[in-house]
Image (tube, helix red, strand yellow):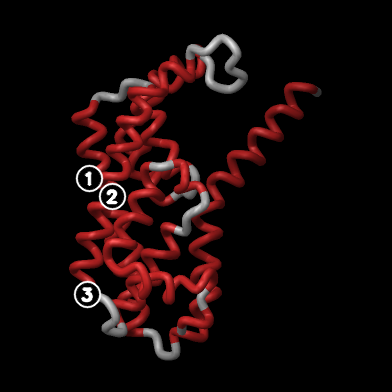
Amino acid sequence: MDSLLPLNLATLIHTVGYLGIFLIVFADSGLLLGLVLPGDSLLFTAGLLASQGHLNLWILLIVAALGAIVGDAVGYAFGTRVGPKLFTREDAWFFTTQQLEHARQFYERHGGKTIVLARFVHFVRTLAPMIAGAAGMHYGTFLLSNIFGGLFWVISVSVLGFWLGNTMPDIDQYILPILGVIGILAFSPTIVHLIQSGVKKRNQRG
């Protein structure tokens, strides 16, 4: 199976072990490096490897969930400390005071479900906790959403890989299409948002 995986994820997981899985999931959740890390594919592949006895599923779930939860917490702390400065810079072209106020209003109404659902959307997964911190989202609400979202994301994606690895014959032949679908699902909300924004701008010009 290793040779069929994009970026050779199976070999990467074998090399870095549980500590590496923790660090990658942590970075994918809480650092800007997460914008280029394959978090969903990594968890799915790790679940497949667990189904083949290369990893212990319970240890995988614990390690990855800790990485996801701690990563979001760090992202929130970073947003709390650095975010307001970015939004109030006079030369800011994107981070403006008005946008910070919009973010505050949004997170007051939808902050909890945003933190949970953002887990499944590439890019947004990394940015959501930082914006939540900058917007001053209540930490108790954030913490509960962070824990639930982290557990739900890690368990659902990893167990899906584990389940398919145990029930689907010749899973090696289908791994690339499956990971491709996961990638499309992860990127699709971002693509839809960009398309909608482009249509909205064209309508405004017209």
State the CA–CA distance, disc 3 to disc 2.
19 Å
| Residue neighbourhood size for the residue with mark 3, other residues' Cα within 10 Å, grouped as few (<14), some (14–19), many (≥20) | some
Q: Which mark is residue 56?
A: 3
Q: Compared to 181, does 36 lie above or below?
A: above
- Mark 1, residues whose alpha carbon is within 10 Å: few (<14), some, or many (≥20)? some
Tag 2 residue? 150
Sequence-earlier tag: 1 or 3: 3
Alpha carbon distance from label 2 to label 1 = 5 Å
Reading the image, the residue beneath label 1 is 147
Q: Is residue 171 above or below residue 122?
A: below
Q: What is the quadrant of the C terminus in the image?
A: top right
For the residue labelled by badge 1, is the local secondary structure a helix, a strand or a loop?
helix
Q: Position of residue 9 (x, y in %)?
A: 45, 71
Under mark 3, the amino acid is Asn
Residue 156 in the image: x percent, y percent?
31, 62
For this rendering, which residue is in front, 62 or 173?
62
Q: Identify the image quadrant of residue 126.
A: top left
